[in-house]
Image (spheres, rainbow, N blue to C red):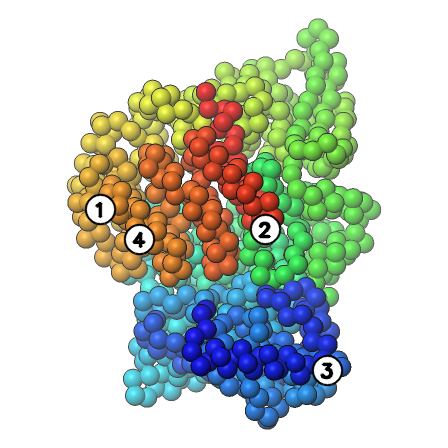
Amino acid sequence: MKKTGLLAIFLVVFNTGYRAQMKSLPKIESGVSYELAQLRKNTVSQIKYELDLKIPESKSERIAGTETLTFNYKKQNEAPLLIDFKEDPSSLMAISVNGQVTKPVLENEHVVIDAKYLTSGANQINITFLAGNGALNRRDGYLYALFVPDRARTMFPCFDQPNLKANYSLTLTIPEKWSGISNGQLKETISQQGQKTLKFAQSDLLPTYLFSFAAGDFKNFTEKISQQDSRILYRETDSVKIKTSMDSIFTLYRNSLDYYEKWTGIKHPFQKHGMVAIPDFQFGGMEHPGAILFQNSTLFLDKTATQNQLNNRSNLIAHEVAHLWFGDMVTMDWFNDVWMKEVFANFMADKSTGASADKSIYDLKFLTTHFPAAYSVDRTSGANPIRQILDNLQNAGMMYGPIIYNKAPIMMRQLELLIGEENFRKGVGEYLKKYAYSNASWPDLITILDNNTSQDLQSWNKVWVNDPGRPVIDYDVKYKGNAIERFAISQHPEYGKEQKSWPQQFQISLFYPDRIEKVEVKLSGTQQEVPELKGKVKPLFILQNSSGIGYGVFKTDKVIMPDFALVKDPINRASAYISLYENMLSGSGVAPLEVLHFYTDQLQKETTELNLRLITGYISAIYWEFLPEKKRLEESGSIESMLWKALQSQTAKNNKKILFDSYQGIFQSQQAYDNLYTIWKSQTPPQDVALNDEDFTNLALSLSLRNKNNSQLLQEQLARIKNQDRVNRFKIIMKAASSDQKIRDDFFNSLTQKENRANESAVGAALSYLHHPLRQQTSIHYLPKSLDMLQEIQKTGDIFFPDNWLRSTFSNYQNPKALDVVNQFLSQHPDYNAILKNKILQATDNLKRAQVLVK
């Protein structure tokens, strides 16, 4: 923020004089450095925050706050105490320390407290301030606090690091018609003069990133969880969705809670339950105990919901509830281990939801959910290890992504297979009990697990956790007559020359006209023979990793395509679909057009919903990213026809919906446009295809991309939307989808202003329309500025936004000029932030591969 007038002059003069008084004042750097965090961990304890916030209805008005901060302190020499507050100095109104009024000093994102005011032992600091808005997500009619990973300091002065847990007592004064929720129980409500004051009980022990509250014009719904009245706040207006979903939401929550209590042997570790459904929430969910935030669109479904949507809802709820133990009760010591809470939340969510399902369904969901997402990063030259290095919490947000959410659960599953399910559970239980309501690191857990097995977990840990990348797993078979004489497998890193191996288990299947021969492999070195296959009759084809639990690029020959009807098991098919795509990307003997034709041939044959969703996603990726425009137009009619025929022939309604979505995402012919326009205009979907309001909105946007004058179409769709939150979202996206170049230019230019990026979910969706392949001739000139803005995006946005920004921008480009922009940017910034550079390399990997594959 810019300093102006007398305040700026005062601060310059005061700070200069203050620094002159201090002896051996340590360097004060922005953010929360590891060194500062360690110093405070050793000197500050027993922290309590009492916060009183007055929230006006208008989001343009500042929020006034008072804070009482108490703590124990081990005074060291005359070094000052630094309290984190990333706001303009004018937001710090008054401070008293242990009853002594002192002039506020805010230097480089820290409130500086002179040692002379502090004592060894108990201390109390009173602060009057204006709350920062950066992490309060103030929307029309509501707000919600989202402080992960280090954004609590953007709202109020605090010790913003995960290993300084504290208790929070919160009072909110809000408009009388609003509701509110926080981590603590609501113990008192006082209404007067059009306002309402909510006083919440002291919270359980929490790190700053888990402290939260929401307030606004919400509806309330209450059900019992563990014999306790528990609320959900929501703004959804679709009565059908509310009626259809509410019981399911609470049932899924209770089922997850029950599973984790039994699995861990530890009862729910916090004082209350509570949920908030947020429109256009930038995450899927956030695990604040007693005030878990969820994405509204994932929670509230109607009768048109596909199995994938139902899975996403159950996974999301199970994930956030798992965090109550993994992350909330036991918290990482430093954010380099943020992946620990996420891997356990995902891994345990898979266990929880799989407990009530057939094992084959669980295995298929695990395979199709985690492997493609993990590979999307781990195959790139910007791949990062699961456990990363972090010097300052201001960079912690960049550590999130598919590696910690998707590769880590795969790793954890292999670890469980390695040491045994019972040893794994015993070790995790010991870890949870030992570090309850405290902090721990990955080495703490791996040491406990190591004590419960004879396996060498330290060397295993290096390749799986501390190194990036994946193995390429090949096989060599020699025949003698019509029988296998020797079958050997080998592995090597996809990148680099270092010799290393990934210890793991997977399955190899030999397919014959009348049977399948399977063998389980425990791969432990760079090469090994599989003696169990010696003497087997020569098969029609071989499928590595047929059970889908192995990780890497498994050699998969295109010879499997002609006889693919022999692959009856859905998991075998999913593994083959994934392996063929990965082999295509690596240039291993199968071309994009061949794989595309194979997938489209499967559209009528593949009846398993998760697999159909998988291959339609691959069809879209190959079609838009790896076919030249001329070839795309040549193939378009055939693919449209096959999708529409499959839609007619498939019997399951969910499958029909998947095919309809794929059809509207790919079509280019006038006939298809007229067909879809009629469906949209009449709001009459094809037979047995269930479409809701959001589906018709998406259809309108698909049509708009193929319409040279789409203003009337977009305005008509806008008029159809009744929910105000969805109206606000569509108003953002329709600018990016407009056929008017000036409107698109103005939209992109508006994103240079932080306030126009506030709804990150809508902005990300809008960018995907702005940079759609059908618009790229006129959107490619946005690319240099998009990269120039990236560091600002990272500083001001939430944790997933930089990756969302990059992928929504670059994902579908194949133009060499787009790659030139990327290469030029990286060459001009040799000292660019390493983590952000990796994000760029990850998001542009397909663009780079397209230069070789597009022929």
Q: Are marks 3 and 1 in contact (CB under 8 Å)?
A: no
Q: Left or right: where does residue 527 sit relative to residue 71?
A: right
Earlier sequence position, callout 1 versus callout 2: 1
Label 2 belongs to which residue?
Answer: 833
Residue type at mark 4? Ile
Image height of 697 relative to 276, above or below? above
Estimate the spatial distance between the alpha carbons at disc 3 and disc 1, rounded to whole Å.
64 Å
Task: Say if mark 4 contacts mark 2, CB within 8 Å.
Answer: no
Look at label 3 and name its amino acid.
Answer: Glu
Which numbered marker is on residue 714? 1
Query: In the rendered image of this protein, does residue 7 appear above or below residue 220?
Result: below
Task: Residue 407: name its quadrant.
Answer: top right
Nearest the eye: 110 or 454: 110
Separation (CA) of disc 4 from disc 1: 12 Å
The residue pinned by badge 4 equals 732
Write the residue at 70% across / 63% down: 440
Q: Which residue is more in the foreground, 497 or 144?
A: 497
Residue 554: x and y in percent read: 62, 28
Task: Check contact, mark 4 vs mark 1: CB within 8 A.
Answer: no
Q: Label for residue 78? A: 3
Task: Give the amino acid at mark 1.
Answer: Leu
Q: Which of marks 4 and 2 is nearer the N terminus?
A: 4
Residue at the spot 59% in from the left edge and 17% down from the top edge: 541
Q: Position of residue 788 (x, y in %)?
A: 47, 49
At mark 2, the secondary structure is loop
Mark 4 lies on a secondary structure that is helix
Residue 289 lies, with reference to residue 52, above or below; the image says: above
